[in-house]
Amino acid sequence: MAKVLRCGDIMPGCDTVIEGKTEDEVFAKAEQHVHKEHNMHFILPSMMNEIEAAIKEKQPKT
Ligand SMILES: [Zn+2]
């Protein structure tokens, strides 16, 4: 099942949606995204928890 992370859930105001086949993939992409777009050079453990909590199953479009 694909996973999806709405960056706005952790970074209010950001409308980027990150998708991946697995949670790990979404996590890796999210890490790159916050490095580049939010100028965070490392991710705090508290933010890791927030990212983890914000990753959801992608709902199939029916
Ligand atoms: Zn973002």
Image (tube, rainbow, N blue to C red):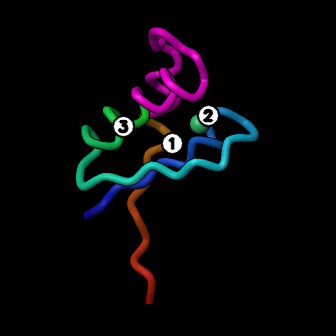
Q: CA distance from mark 3 to mark 2?
A: 14 Å
Q: CA distance from mark 1 to mark 2?
A: 7 Å
Q: Nearer the viewer, mark 3 or mark 2?
A: 3
Q: Could you classify mark 3 by the number of other residues whose Cα lies within 10 Å: few (under 14), some (14-19), or many (20 or more)?
A: some
Left or right placement of residue 11 versus residue 49 in this view: right
Q: Are the residues tagged 1 and 2 within 8 Å (C-beta)?
A: yes
Marks 3 and 1, the one that precedes in the sequence? 3
Q: Would the CB of label 3 be found within 8 Å of ligand 1?
A: no
Q: Residue at x 44, y 22 (%)?
A: 48
Secondary structure mostly seen in magenta is helix
Q: CA distance from mark 3 to mark 1?
A: 14 Å
Callout 3 amino acid: Lys
Q: Which residue is mark 1?
A: 54
Callout 2 amino acid: Ile
Residue 62: % across, % down: 44, 90
Q: Residue at x 52, y 20 (%)?
A: 47
The magenta segment is 31-51
Q: Residue at x 51, y 42 (%)?
A: 54
Q: Could you classify mark 2 by the number of other residues whose Cα lies within 10 Å: few (under 14), some (14-19), or many (20 or more)?
A: some
Residue 10, numbered label = 2
Per the image, label 3 sits on a secondary structure element best described as helix
Above or below, 36 relative to 43? below
